Amino acid sequence: MTELRYEYVPPSSTTRLDHVGTYKRNVPVSLERMYENALDWEHLPHLHASSFGSLTWVDSGAWGWRAYATNAKGQESLLELRLDESARRWITTNLEGPSAGAEIWTHVFEVAPRSLDLVIDFFVPGVPLEAREKVGMAYARAYEVLYDEDVWMMSERQKGLDQRLDAVEIGSDCRIATPAPEDLPMKVEVANRTYHLNRYREKWVVHPALCPHQLGPLSAQIDGEGRVSCPWHGYQFDVESGECVEGSRCQFGRRPAVAEVGDALVISFRE
Ligand code: FES
Ligand SMILES: [Fe+2]
């Protein structure tokens, strides 16, 4: 079993009887990213595919969300997350299923604009006194994995937001020697934005490296149906039309054109 890289605090005699422990860690993200992540029910079965099998939405809003979720063993639970920004806290409750009655209380403390201390308390009813620490450690290990994945998503999204440009520079271009098939897909930079260059149906295609949904890392590989996918919420896009194939309203923004000029490719935005 690997060591926890962060702090697990066992329950004490002064806490609630069903308290099985506390997990603490710092995350290098803003409060805005953290709340956005807590309210984002949609990423659970994609970003956290090792913890969740599937998810069926029931309700959501600025208050939080409710959804049926299956775990890696296929057991279904009804989960509810309630956010209380005034208390800098959200409570996740297991309403139905094998761990019904379990509550996870997360408190967040802003250390700096992009540095948060999280204190996560696990309350699980019916655990005998001598087993509390073992159960608490299991929760802490599970949360460590979830937060490693969430920190990756929140940091990459922040990086994407920081670099986002409101308008592309018309006329800017990128010239490269025509790549050999084994060099594809290839990353190219045009107007300070990153794209993937590839061939599909014997034509050059350029698609953004950042997902138009929430700036996740779109796959560089095009599948057999002409799609690229994003690991954060599982959206898939048709590389020719740029549309999201699940019918979600998001789609690729303006893309540069590719032209063959002698032995070179010119990838550019034109009027
Ligand atoms: S960021 Fe949500 S699907 Fe890509
Ligand atoms: Fe998450």
Image (tube, rainbow, N blue to C red):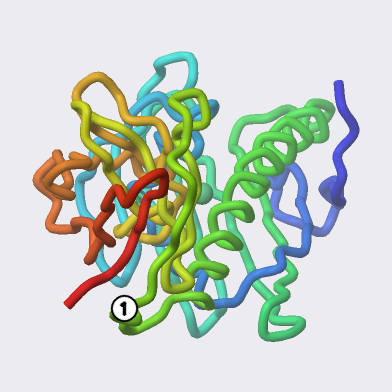
Q: Is 64 on the left-hand or right-hand side of 4?
A: left
* Vertical relation: 204 (above or below) 155: above
Q: How many marks?
A: 1
Q: Which quadrant of the rendered structure holds the N terminus?
A: top right
> Depth check: 103 or 215 in front?
215
Residue 33 visible in the snapshot: yes
Q: Position of residue 30 (x, y in %)?
A: 60, 76
Which residue is depicted at the point 47% across and 29% down? 180
Q: Which quadrant of the rendered structure holds the C terminus?
A: bottom left
Which residue is depicted at the point 46% across and 59% down? 194
Q: Position of residue 233 (x, y in %)?
A: 36, 44
Mark 1 and ligand 1: say if the CB distance to the nearest ligand atom is below 8 Å: no
Q: Residue furthest front?
A: 262
Instruction: Locate residue 224: give its quadrant.
Output: top left
Q: SS of the residue at dot 1? A: loop
> Depth check: 271 or 17 in front?
271
Q: Is 144 on the left-hand or right-hand side of 91?
A: right
* Vertical relation: 257 (above or below) 112: above
Q: Is 42 on the left-hand or right-hand side of 271?
A: right
Q: Is 116 on the left-hand or right-hand side of 255?
A: right
Q: Position of residue 155 (x, y in %)?
A: 60, 62
* Vertical relation: 42 (above or below) 50: below
Q: Position of residue 208 (x, y in %)?
A: 36, 54
- Answer few, some or many: residues within 10 Å of disc 1's Cα (few below 14, many 20 plus, some between 14 and 19): few
Q: Which residue is mark 1?
A: 171
Which residue is depicted at the point 50% across and 67% down? 160
Which residue is depicted at the point 34% across and 84% down? 166
Residue type marked 1: Gly
